[in-house]
Image (cartoon, rainbow, N blue to C red):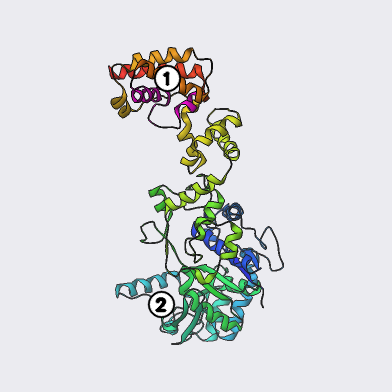
Amino acid sequence: MQQVRVRFAPSPTGPLHIGGVRTALYNYLFAKKNKGIFILRIEDTDQTRFVEGAEEYIMESLKWCGMKIDEGIIEGGNYGPYRQSDKKLQYRQYADMLMNNGDAYYAFDTPGKLEELRISAEREGNAFIYNASIRDNMRNSLSMPESKWKELLEKEEPYVIRYKMPLNEDVHCDDMIRGHIVVNTSTLDDKVLIKADGMPTYHLAHLVDDHLMKISHVIRGEEWLPSLPLHFLLYRSFGWEKPLFAHLPLLLKPDGKGKLSKRDGDKMGFPVFPLFWPYGETAKGYREEGYYPEAFVNMLALLGWNPGTEQEIFTMDELINAFSIERVHKSGSRFDPEKAKWFNHHYLQLRSNNELALEFRDYLRAQGYHHDIGDLEAIISLVKERVSFVKDIWRETDFFFKSPDVYDKEVIKKRWKPETPAQLLELKAFLDERDTFTPQITEQAVKGWIEKKEYNTGDVMNAFRLVIVGASRGPHLFDIISFIGKEETLMRIEKGIAVIGNKVQ
């Protein structure tokens, strides 16, 4: 059996969309499931769109996701170079092979002329197709005498090399996800294989590379499905054995209407890239937004594939064992940002309090707060189940580190009564006399004091929480005051009475 060899072949034209990461992931899972090789190839033949830093961004993204590259620019291998621009001349010899076979030709049509024909076709409600129906009337080596087009070559007249699409032929293609596909060549155009700058287009370059790298399976995005008939014909023209093809479904907007884009993420507040993109128009990434790589990968894997069971949580090894192309969907998969958060919440719960405390300590230090890891572990144990991200811990625990600057107006309106200031001052005096400030002992003492005074427990405790926290939120109140200590507790009671009292008046 032929060794499974797959490739992820992105273009370094900007940040890597999560749809691209999913393509890489499915290639990776398929390769590992079948004891195969996962290759990273950089397809940078479009030099006009090349973005500095994009290549490194791609490699860092795959590394963060836990996908180990077997062959690539950094890793090396027996089938390099793994960057297309490093072998520009190599592609031309394969284009020449097609020319010699009569399956390709020179085309000298100017961009202006082609644009004129496109506009004219659109006016008549048609799509402009450069193929057998018009090629004999165009400026190319099929319509000219040999002496004429050779003269143009000698004069270094700009040209491209186009594939000569067969006339009125049904092309039969097989796809591992889509099944059997039949397309007539009358609907296909004579695609450019070599551009005017001498660089190959995707159609030629990827196919030559896949052949030379012995790629066994091409697993790529749905956007390349319309090009599949051309690629089948190119393999036939070269006389090469074809790999097996699988075209993955699109990632759709949360409403299911159209392809997921950066604009959707910006509008709804979620990333569409794995990492922060720092160049030009910056874009946020899942890593920097606080997602764990395990959660990100788990979420992506289930966007377009299902294991055939109710299981939703998978380690990378479990994904490898369960993955199969046969269970990849044909239709697009709707992205659900809330489900992405759900995955992260799950993986956060699996982390120990110590691990989270170490992560949260970095967040606190950035804001100027320094605390012992043991104290942070104790705080995290109180709020862990409520958060989905480490950064959320601050939202749930800020009052452990600083006294409130504002007090919830609705709580004041509902809980602050004329007798509240006096009751809190009495409570302050009572707490000042306490030598022990542990949660259980302090709670028993305060509740005993309230009962003795015959005060309403709810009124006193809600007002107490308000001056300590600033709102009706947070874990057990006596855990909070035990952590902040007696001195800080007394100070907050006094401050709260003064600030809220002024507002009420």
Residue position for label 2: 129
Which amino acid lies under the numbered mark 2 shown in the image of this protein? Ile
Instruction: Tell me the mark number nearer the camera, choosing from 1 and 2.
Output: 1
Q: Is residue 190 magenta?
A: no
Chief SS of the magenta region: helix
Measured along the vertical axis of the image, is residue 356 above or below residue 129? Answer: above
Q: Position of residue 30 (x, y in %)?
A: 59, 67
Q: Circle 2 — which element?
A: loop
184 vs 452, nearest the viewer: 452
Estimate how packed mark 2 is, as few (under 14), some (14 to 19) or many (20 or more) residues with alpha carbons within 10 Å. some
Q: Amino acid at mark 1?
A: Gly
- Is 473 in front, or is 87? 473
Q: Which residues are magenta?
A: 455-481
Circle 1: element type: helix
Q: Quadrant of the N terminus?
A: bottom right
Q: What residue does disc 1 label?
A: 448
Hey, which quadrant is residue 352 in on the image? Answer: top right
Locate residue 318, reporting x and y percent: 59, 60
* Residue 464 seen in the current view: yes
Which of the marked residues, 1 or 2, is nearer the chain's N terminus?
A: 2
Q: Nearer the viewer, residue 207 or 324?
A: 324
Q: Quadrant of the C terminus?
A: top left
Judged from this view, the residue extending furthest toward the right is 78
Is the residue 239 above or below the residue 473 in the image? below
Q: Are marks 1 and 2 in contact (CB under 8 Å)?
A: no
Residue 167, image x, y percentages: 45, 87
Disc 1 to disc 2, C-alpha distance? 88 Å
Residue 44: give x, y in percent of width and height: 57, 62
